[in-house]
Amino acid sequence: MPTRKLKKPAEGSQKPVTADMVAWKKEFDEIPQEEHLAKLKALGLDDSELEEFKEMEEGAPVEDEIMQEGPLGKEEEPAKKKTVKKKAVKKK
């Protein structure tokens, strides 16, 4: 019996919000940060990863967001050279 191939969702698409997700989000928001960090440490995260989590929860300082172009934390890619193709001239 052939099985149907599963279709992957498009990259970056969001899953539909379910009642379980809403309940989890509510529970997550009610947990104090110290308790959450303790649970993450029990899962095996080290101190540098915990500091990174704290920074993500607090968000970036407003001054840093204003002074920088584009999203924070991403390296700028070098500017790509634009190539111009010349049209070929047909000889008669």
Image (tube, rainbow, N blue to C red):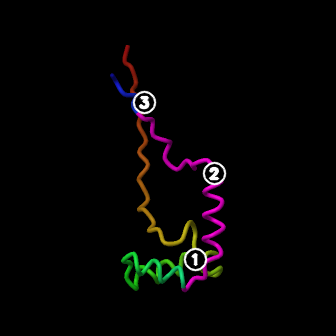
Residue projecting furthest to the top? 92
Judge the density around disc 3: few (<14), some (14-19), many (≥20) Cα neighbours within 10 Å. few
Amino acid identity at mark 2: Thr
From the viewer's perspective, is residue 50 above or below residue 92? below
Q: Residue at x 41, y 62 (%)?
A: 78
Give the labeled residue for mark 1: 57
Residue 63 visible at all? yes
Q: Is residue 83 magenta?
A: no
Callouts 1 and 2 close, C-beta under 8 Å: no
- Of mark 1 and mark 2, the one earlier in the sequence is 2
Give the labeled residue for mark 2: 18
Amino acid identity at mark 3: Lys
User: Marks 3 and 2, Cα distance to the nearest angstrom?
Assistant: 55 Å
Give the labeled residue for mark 3: 87
User: Marks 1 and 2, Cα distance to the nearest angstrom?
Assistant: 23 Å
Task: Give the extent of the magenta segment.
Answer: 6-34
Q: Residue at x 49, y 47 (%)?
A: 11
Q: Nearer the viewer, residue 78 or 3?
A: 3
Amino acid identity at mark 1: Glu
> Measured from the top left, where is residue 41 in percent x and y?
42, 81
Nearer the observer: mark 3 or 2; the answer is 2
In the figure, residue 28 lies in which quadrant? Answer: bottom right
